[in-house]
């Protein structure tokens, strides 16, 4: 199988219910060709279904990337296509199942390409880069609070405490999806990337995220440490992290991991009332 990324990647994925939620609505995806975090929204409207639909689309795109010679692939167009497919699927599914109307999900995805990544981002999950000991946020939150900060109406220092900080300006939703941010990012050997849901960043200051990423020996240790930090800070929301190291040699190999919070966490009784095809979608791994 061709795998023409020039990057050697090592990655780990983890999700946790947190300390206050009954259902884990987050999902994540990781393979050598695609890495993503999706944070489902709409507690009563099955956020876990929405985030599962997002990672199912990631798996589909990954299959295509694995099966094709990627020289002809436009990575940003490929991600844009996957985002549109998620938007269509959310609308279709909500049409078939009125109880799912109003569900939605964020998506932050990295597609390794050449010496870097193509990035797709929609919502308030985040992508970070640790390089040379410095933490840099690669994505821009699509939240009301971020818009107020950008507009100069809210001091940056107050954003983290704002009572409406989780209000999204756009996301992938069954009732209509926003356009994703799509961009290319140049990677370097030694980079460590983090994709995470807001269950981490809402309660963990950047400096603590930086420290955990800088100190962890490998991606697996980093994921565990970050989840622990969020839970120590109260764990008010589901926490999902994908940590990726860029190494000097491409391996082109590495397992595929699909994490569906709903499947890994406590059993959601509501899920069992869903039609078979939807239960299969949620159970698919
Ligand atoms: Mg969340």
Image (tube, helix red, strand yellow):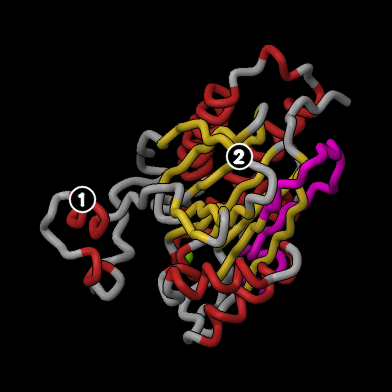
CB under 8 Å between callouts 2 and 1? no
Left or right of 108, for residue 59: right
The question of residue 269 being in magenta is answered with yes
Query: Dot 2 corresponds to which residue?
Result: 187
3 vs 235, nearest the viewer = 3
Q: Position of residue 58 (x, y in %)?
A: 65, 39
Could you tell me which residue is drawn at 78 percent across and 42 percent down? 248
Q: Position of residue 272 (x, y in %)?
A: 66, 64
The question of residue 193 being in magenta is answered with no
174 vs 94, nearest the viewer = 174
> 139 above or below 99?
above
Query: Dot 1 corresponds to which residue?
Result: 150
Which dot, 2 or 1, sits closer to the camera? 2
Task: Report if the beta carbon of the residue with label 2 is closer than 8 angstroms to ligand 1.
Answer: no
Could you tell me which residue is drawn at 47 percent across and 36 percent down? 87
Q: Is residue 49 in view from this perspective? A: no
Left or right of 140, for residue 67: right
Q: In which image quadrant can residue 49 be found? A: bottom right
> 229 above or below 271?
below
Q: Position of residue 124 (x, y in %)?
A: 40, 55
Task: Tell me how far mark 2 sits from mark 1, CA to CA.
Answer: 27 Å
- The magenta segment: 244-272
At mark 2, the secondary structure is loop
């Amino acid at each position: 199988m061709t795998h023409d990324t020039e990057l050697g990647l090592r990655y780990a994925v983890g999700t946790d219910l947190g300390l206050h939620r009954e259902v884990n609505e987050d999902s994540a995806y990781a393979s050598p060709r695609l890495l993503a975090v999706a944070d489902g929204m709409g507690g009563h409207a099955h956020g876990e279904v929405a985030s599962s639909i997002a990672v199912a689309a990631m798996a589909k795109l990954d299959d295509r990337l694995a099966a094709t010679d990627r020289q002809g692939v436009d990575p940003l167009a490929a991600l844009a296509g996957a985002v549109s497919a998620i938007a269509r699927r959310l609308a279709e599914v909500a049409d078939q199942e009125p109880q799912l109307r109003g569900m939605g999900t964020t998506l932050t995805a990295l597609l390794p390409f050449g010496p870097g990544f193509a990035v797709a981002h929609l919502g308030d999950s985040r992508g970070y880069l640790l390089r040379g000991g410095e933490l840099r946020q690669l994505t821009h939150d699509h939240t009301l609070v971020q818009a107020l900060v950008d507009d100069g109406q809210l001091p940056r220092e107050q954003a983290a405490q704002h009572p409406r900080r989780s209000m999204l300006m756009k996301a992938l939703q069954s009732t209509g999806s926003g356009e994703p941010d799509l961009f290319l990012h140049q990677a370097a050997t030694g980079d460590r990337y983090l994709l995470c849901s807001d269950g981490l960043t809402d309660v963990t200051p950047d400096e603590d995220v930086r420290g955990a990423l800088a100190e962890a020996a490998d991606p697996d240790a980093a994921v565990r440490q970050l989840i622990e930090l969020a839970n120590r800070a109260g764990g008010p929301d589901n926490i999902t992290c994908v940590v990726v190291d860029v190494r000097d040699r491409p391996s082109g190999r590495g397992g595929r991991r699909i994490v569906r919070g709903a499947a890994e966490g406590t059993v959601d009784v509501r899920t069992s009332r869903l039609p078979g095809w939807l239960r299969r979608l949620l159970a698919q791994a």
